Image (spheres, rainbow, N blue to C red):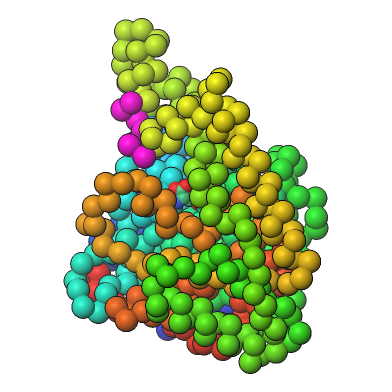
Amino acid sequence: MLDNLTILEASKLIDEKKVSALEITNSYLKKIEDSKKLNCFITVSHDKAVHAAKETDNRVSKNNRIGPMDGIPLAYKDLFCTKDTLTTASSKILSNFIPTYESTVTNNCINKGAITLGKLNCDEFAMGSTNKTSFYGPVVNPWKSLDSDEELVPGGSSGGSAASVAADLCIASIGTDTGGSIRQPASFTGAVGLKPTYGRVSRWGTIAFASSLDQAGPISKTVEDAAILLQTISGHDNKDSTSSQKPNEHYFSNLNSSVKNLKIGIPKEYMSDDLPLEIQNYWNEGKKILSENGAEIIEISLPHTKTALPAYYIIAPAEASSNLSRYDGVKYGLRTNEKNLIKMYESTRSDGFGDEVKRRIMIGTYVLSSGYYDAYYLKAQKIRSLIKKDFDNVFKDVNAILTPATPNTAFAIDKEEKDPVKNYLNDIFTVPINLAGLPAISIPFGLDKKGLPVGMQLITNSFEEQLLLNIAKNIQDSINFKNEPKCWWK
Ligand code: GLN
């Protein structure tokens, strides 16, 4: 009865006093303990979780439950600072960092009564799309191919956040998305992953990768749960000057799955012969479903799509190189013992950062250096404006855009990729959306012939998360996908 619960189902059980929050929490803690093979968690907050669950039960006994999140066990990507709980960004350089404060995202969840099960593995500083750059080792996808026993990547960088939802180690989780890190792993694991509009969710207390692109968002089993979670974590925050002043919305109670008379754009630039036939077929099925349900499907053009990835891989490393300069062994985190200060900086950073992070710092420093700034960084910023303009133009004619979430499905962890640029291609469909600051969602759509999940992406204009969720719900209700990988890991 406590397996595969959604937020809505668990909330009902708690409300009706059929199960206590403590029983639910203990059952998840047990599942986490039994599923170490997946390597989803860096830290399990056992005592914190039990304590919070007892507090929920106390409120429930007085008929004082705060709302639908009260008593719901969640887990967070290890990029959100959590008071008195280790927060590593999956990096050796932060492997001893215990924040004295709570991020706004986690604080918002805690204030609504949610239970913190622990902190989830991810790519180091959220750089990657396989979860293989983590200092704590790769996360394993709970899904396996029908014809092979190989362990697969869950996608990244929020790999632990997606895999833990698919393996039912938490009811839902929170990840971050700088170029696709919520949507791509959601797609690889059969979960729903929502990246909100830039500024909808406060970044305060979230370890920064590329500040003009980073956004936190939910990974869940259903669109309804994504709506509840978005409502929980979003809203203005004085502590983040980029957080929007727009009032928070009641995404869940306003959920309405009608797509009648909506115009859905299909960008021709997202289609290529390299896109696997099965993904093309699901994309066509998506168009068919929406059209049968009353929407109009329109071909659109986003002409600068192919420049998005190169622009992203200049802007994101540039911001990362600046953000990561704070890790120098002086104030917090790892410090190696050296006789002089410069040597201490050098050896702390060379010992503390992994290869991918170092690659990004070097690229970022290079594109920002004098002489190259105009040629690379400034040019990339100009391209970013053109990409945003492409979307502004199409949103004059359509309400939303439908594309595949990823150009592939999950692949083997052991697949050695020598060329980092090939890995960067995983985000080809997700990166333009971050550059334009728009909201987008990945929803599970079906399985490929290997039995692995395929996700579809919906994109809307800024702050139209309600519409995004509504269309996603329409698709979800039309296909009835079950995120239940065969359990082999216990
Ligand atoms: N895979 C992309 C990168 O490595 C996106 C990461 C993210 O969204 N955090 O930059």
State the residue in front, 355 or 345: 355
Q: Which quadrant, please, contains the C terminus?
A: bottom left
Q: Residue furthest left?
A: 149
- Give yes or no for residue 172 being in the magenta stretch: no
Vertical placement of 481 versus 305: above or below? below
- Could one spot residue 374 in this view of the protein? yes
Is 463 displayed left or right of 308 in the figure? Answer: right
Expressed as whole percent of the image width and height from the top left, the position of residue 55 reads 57, 61
Q: Residue at x 71, y 43 (%)?
A: 242
- Give yes or no for residue 353 being in the magenta stretch: yes
Expressed as whole percent of the image width and height from the top left, the position of residue 98 reads 46, 37
Residue 475 found in image quarter: bottom right
Residue range in magenta is: 350-356
Vertical placement of 185 versus 236: above or below? below
For the stretch drawn in magenta, the main secondary structure is helix
Vertical placement of 138 versus 241: above or below? below
